[in-house]
Amino acid sequence: MAEMTRFRIGITHDFLRPDGTLSFPDIGLDTLADSERIGVEWEFIPESVDEITPDIAARYDGIVALRPRFTAATVGRVDRRLAAIARFGVGYDRIDVPAMTAAGVLLAITPDGVRRPVAQAVLTFILALAGRLFDKDRVTRAGDGFTRAGEFMGMGITGRTLALLGVGNIGRDIVKLVAPFEMRVIAHDPYARADDLASIGVKLVDIDTLFREGDFVSVNCPLTDETRHIVGERLLGLMKPSAYLINTARGPIVDETALYPVLRDRRIAGAGLDVFEMEPVAADNPILQLDNVIVTPHALCWTDECFRGNGAGALGALLAIARGEAPANGVVNRAALDHPWLKAHLGAFAERARANEEAARATA
């Protein structure tokens, strides 16, 4: 093992503006306030890259990642130093998890940071779509609001059916947020148990029933090989003409080629889309031309709560690694903890953290 005196954390460059200032007001950097006591140093990674290179992986023990990819090539060199990746969020479709596990690189996500903000984003879409908010805004700005308001009658959501495709941490928080509206909630999730969901007032159903009965169908599942394009022509064809589709998860879960004609021909009432198959979404994407769709740039959950929570969670995970410990939650690939390379490094990190703390106490 190479001699290392400090635990180095790199934060990906995409948190910064071109002038080097933070793009976001608070990403929980104060989590690192006392980290020097255990021998931690940190910086923003100077390079702006789409994929973390082997050179970058050779400089840092832990990386907080916003958008860059991590591939087998990232961790393929013998001088690799990288022991842990902390995703700023919960999606990890840009990270080759099997390659990280095989190399002994731990991946952690931040479920506590995104749970409430994403649930809030889904509720925002539900209320905006149900109230025809953007239609009424548009005609009012055009000077016709008070004469045409009756054309854009909204839908009361009490007693309506909210259908959740995926009911993990975020889905369960959505259930809490809609409770005052007395909605009926159904869900499809191959990893959920009917009795468990029943205890929170949710009925587990098959996927066809989900799309057939939902007044608001919300996509909350991760993007995997199994879920890519799972929402396609067949399932969209089951939806009610009065129903709305909401996607705040990952764009490729929904087949946009199938969705566009369904929206264009008003075979469903509309959609709220925070994510797209290709991001950034192209200006000529035909979905953007439709007036029954609300679109946002994969950022509807971007709130002060979200960014501070994600930052504190990601940095907290790396500080645990710096102390030679596994993060308390959010570990994606626990098998990496059994890898000899990572085991050896965690032992070295723990020893170094203790030595640094003792030195700090001695000089206090």
Image (cartoon, grey):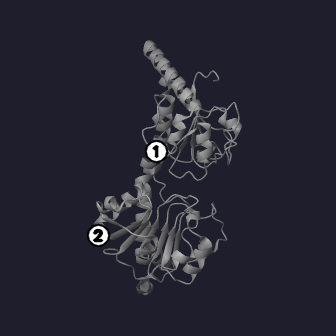
251 over 147 or under it: above or below: above
Q: Is residue 39 visible?
A: no
303 over 180 or under it: above or below: above
Residue ID for mark 1: 330
Q: Amino acid at mark 2?
A: Glu
Going 54% across and 70% down the picture, which residue do you hit? 231
Q: Secondary structure at mark 2?
A: loop
Going 46% across and 35% down the picture, which residue do you hit? 31
On residue 182, the disc is 2
Q: Which percent across, then down, holds residue 196? A: 32, 58
Q: Which percent across, then down, holds residue 121? A: 44, 61
- Front residue of 312/150: it is 312
For this view, does 363 lie left or right of residue 339?
left
- Front residue of 327/36: it is 327
Q: Amino acid at mark 1?
A: Gly
Q: Which percent across, then down, holds residue 13? A: 63, 43
Going 44% across and 12% down the picture, which residue do you hit? 362
